[in-house]
Amino acid sequence: MVRLNHIGIAVSQLPRITRLFAILGLPLDHSENVPDQGVKTHFIPLPPQAASIELLEVVDSEGAVAHFLKKRGPGVHHIALSVGDGELNSICETLRSEGYRLVYLEPKPGAHGARINFIHPSSADGILIELMEGGSS
């Protein structure tokens, strides 16, 4: 079963945006470095813990999110969908066979210990879609 896991937002002023969400009753719950992505992720769970907002803080000025911020500025970076355990590889194979472009040849480690891959925005009407398998959300 596929479900919304989180919406990733690239930020340039983390303290300001986390304060805003805290004022709205949505405090930070979890932060984690993701060196492969060049970011530190900060998660804000959404009631009733069905999904979350992920704030992407750049820690590597050469990473993909840093380039996104330089090109487009702060804002929605991606949406993430959780897939069932053991389904990510077959979903990626099916997407490729149907002509969809994926960012990685093989899934990579992501936040929460999940395995991830992305559907490239050129194949999804400009939307970067993260596919996640496993890990704790």
Image (cartoon, rainbow, N blue to C red):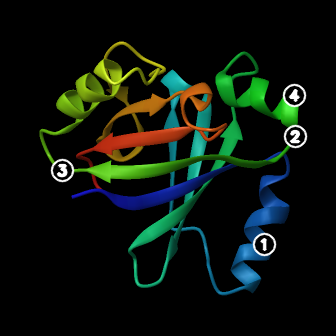
Tag 3 near tag 1, CB within 8 Å = no
Query: Is residue 114 left or right of 24 when viewed as pictured?
Result: left
Q: Quadrant of the N terminus?
A: bottom left
Which label sits on residue 84? 3
Camera-nearest label, 1 or 2: 2
Query: Is residue 89 left or right of 132 when viewed as pictured?
Result: left
Q: Earlier in the sequence, mark 3 or mark 1?
A: 1
Q: Residues within 10 Å of mark 4 (few under 14, many from 20)?
A: few
Q: The residue under label 2 is which amino acid type? A: Gly
Calculate the distance from the C-alpha at mark 2 to the C-alpha at mark 3.
33 Å
Q: The residue under label 4 is which amino acid type? A: Lys
Relative to 45, is 62 above or below? above
Residue 137 shows in this picture: no
Residue at the front extreme of this rendering = 98
Helix, strand or loop status at disc 4: helix
Relative to 54, is 16 above or below? below
Q: Earlier in the sequence, mark 2 or mark 3?
A: 2
Q: The residue under label 3 is which amino acid type? A: Gly
Residue under the point 69% across and 23% down:
60
* Residue in the foreground of this view, choosing between 50 and 101: 101
Among the 4 quarters of the image, the one containing residue 127: top right
Calculate the distance from the C-alpha at mark 1 to the C-alpha at mark 2.
20 Å
Tag 4 near tag 3, CB within 8 Å = no
Which residue lies under the disc numbered 4? 70
* Residue in the foreground of this view, choosing between 9 and 124: 124
Q: Quadrant of the C terminus?
A: bottom left
Calculate the distance from the C-alpha at mark 4 to the C-alpha at mark 3.
34 Å
Q: Earlier in the sequence, mark 1 or mark 2?
A: 1
Which residue lies under the disc numbered 2? 73
Which residue lies under the disc numbered 1? 19
